[in-house]
Amino acid sequence: MRSVWILFNTNLLAQRAGIRVRTVYRYFPNKFAVLAELARRNTARAVEAVDKFATLADANVPLQQGLDILWSNYLSQLAGIPGIAAVRHACRVCPELESIRHEFHSKLSKQLETAIKKRGVQLKPAQRRLIAALFIETTSAILDYAETVDRKRRLDLLRELQIMQYRYLAPYFS
């Protein structure tokens, strides 16, 4: 999945969509604008999937169950989105798209921080922010890495990621 922005261009987009290139340019000034719109739509779906970390905020839901529900929602919401891995890659490596990725991580971190507080976890605000940011950034890094390996290895990585998340949060949630 190297150099998505080099492999993707408006001519190819128009050809695949069965439209003229000038039609693409009527709505988007360049290929980065197209990728940015796709990234915004994908991140909106991801934010919706984690549902403000509601299951982690609910003290009546055991942490492991909350994480399982969170993962199930996340994976089912994002499964089948054409090109999602390529768009994630573009946001990682393309300076024009990095701000979208940063905004997304910031939004998820704030939502997780709020969920931790709602759960009643007694931590200072700065520590809640740090835990939430670390959770989001490590999750994202492993998901990014998982996109570069074969399916079996990806599934193994996702299982290990779930274990890692649980073990990271458990001391704070107990």
Image (tube, rainbow, N blue to C red):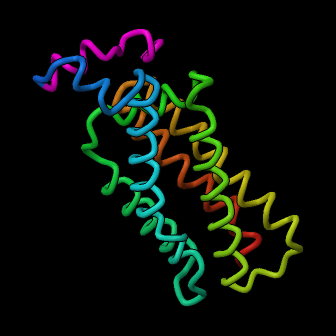
Count of all numbered marks drawn on residues in the image: 0
Q: Residue furthest bottom?
A: 60
Query: Residue 16: image x %, image y %?
Result: 16, 21
Q: Is residue 149 above or below residue 104?
A: above
Residue at screen point 82% across, 81% down: 122
Which quarter of the image is occupied by the C terminus? bottom right
- 96 part of magenta stretch: no
Which quarter of the image is occupied by the N terminus? top left
Q: Is residue 23 above or below residue 52?
A: above
Q: Residue furthest left?
A: 18
Residue at screen point 46% across, 49% down: 43
Query: Residue 58: image x %, image y %?
Result: 56, 85
- 8 part of magenta stretch: yes
Query: Residue 65: image x %, image y %?
Result: 48, 73
Residue at screen point 53% across, 31% down: 91
Residue at screen point 67% across, 84% down: 118
173 or 80, which lies in front? 80
Apparent side of residue 15 relative to residue 95 in the rendered image (left or right): left
Q: Residue furthest top?
A: 6
Specify start and end residues of the magenta stretch as a single range.
Answer: 1-17
- Name the magenta segment's main secondary structure: helix
Query: Residue 155: image x %, image y %?
Result: 39, 40
Residue 128 figure quarter: bottom right
Residue 95 figure quarter: top right
Apparent side of residue 147 relative to residue 82 in the rendered image (left or right): right
